Amino acid sequence: MNRNKLTILIGVVCIIVVIIMSLIGCSSNTTTQTTTTTSKPTATSSSTIIGTTTPVVGPIARVITAGPDENVWFTESNENNICKLSPLTGKITVYNVPTPDSYPWGITTGSDGNVWFTETSGDKIGVISLATGKIIEYNVTTINSGPIGIITGPDGNLWFTEEPGNKIGKLSPTTGSVTEYSVPDTNAFLYDGIAAGPDGNVWFTESQGNKVGKISPATGEIIEYNVPATNGVNARPYGITSGPDGNLWFTELNDNQIAKISPALGSITEYNLPGDFVGPYGITAGPDGSLWFTDVFENKIGEMSPTTGEITKYGIPTDYTAPYAIIAGPDGNLWFTENSINQIGKISPANGTVIEYSLVIPSS
């Protein structure tokens, strides 16, 4: 098995193990705040599952993005596919990645109007033309770089994380040229947490290094900020997004917290999440001005006010789905992936209604 793919699979297995355990009972200024939870009901009773659900064997959606064509695009790592889903019809179109077993992971819309993605085992960055469906792949310079997360930066380039490579990479959508920048912390563990900041920098999380970093697109300078370990261990920062308030917001998987960092000051404020075993992972800014996040362990989608810190949680109708990545969709809903089942979900910010779509395409 390819080294990069094995490394990623180990990380995924670790998360799944923690989920199973939960089911059987098993240098910056910092402020911690206690949040409150509203008593809104979960959305299970008003939810719908479209299509046929099968066990975990089969297509699994990993990361998701809103395309410039009003569709939702996502990666199927285990099936080596790039897929698009129409929010209007629920129809799924599948495109196979040319490189076998490339394990596509991160995905984003590029400044050129196409959809770009990482190939973790293939050590490549791919782009799919919305006009033709043709895929072009670009090699990453470092061998065993393991590109994972990817976003379009403030400078119009594609920026991506390299987990085994311990680097931040940049790719020009015009020329395909790749530039890489080594992260100071040699044990950073750069997963798929990367975001364009309101300050013109690219921000990322360091899960093992317990830091949040930023890189200047102009100079390549990297600055790292320590994340507090409130519970005495690594907080495990993962997802990160630019918030509506001008701050960067990120999840802390181990500390059961949502945190924000000021791009101007580097100061971090943390918000405790209610619940005994919470697993915040993906996070995004919603069209309603709230922050929305996935709760891997509680099998819920969370909503948080960046102003008051108030939390609302919504249940997912299917049990044990391991909700992972989440984005604001082109239709005004929040869309999320379910890492332990063959489905993608969407939730309405207006009423919390959840609808799930099967990834299993019926045989004709």
Image (cartoon, rainbow, N blue to C red):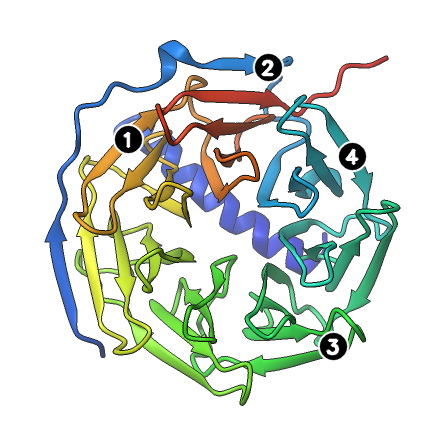
Contact? badges 4 and 1 (CB < 8 Å)? no
Instruction: Kindly identify the residue that appears in the image at 19 percent across and 47 percent down.
Output: 309
- Whole-angstrom CA distance, mark 4 to mark 1, is 32 Å
Q: Which residue is mark 4?
A: 94
Does the residue at mark 4 contact the one at mark 2 (Cβ under 8 Å)? Answer: no
Q: Earlier in the sequence, mark 2 or mark 3?
A: 2
Judged by depth in the image, the label closer to the viewer, 3 or 1, is 1
Residue placed most toward the observer, 187 or 305 = 305
Q: Position of residue 149 (x, y in %)?
A: 57, 59
In primary-sequence order, the first of circles 4 and 2 is: 2
Dot 3 corresponds to which residue?
A: 141
Label 4 secondary element = strand
> Which residue is labeled 1 in the image?
313
Q: Is residue 322 visible?
A: yes
For disc 1, the neighbor class at 10 Å (few under 14, some 14 to 19, many from 20) is many
Q: Is residue 291 above or below residue 165?
A: above
Say what secondary structure mark 3 lies in: loop
User: Does the CB distance between marks 4 and 3 fall below 8 Å?
Assistant: no
Q: Residues within 10 Å of mark 4 (few under 14, many from 20)?
A: some
Instruction: Identify the mark nearer the N-term, 1 or 2.
Output: 2
Q: Amino acid at mark 2?
A: Ile
- Judge the density around disc 3: few (<14), some (14-19), many (≥20) Cα neighbours within 10 Å: some
Q: Is residue 26 visible?
A: no
Q: Position of residue 51 (x, y in %)?
A: 64, 14
Give the camera-side residue of 8 and 95.
Answer: 95
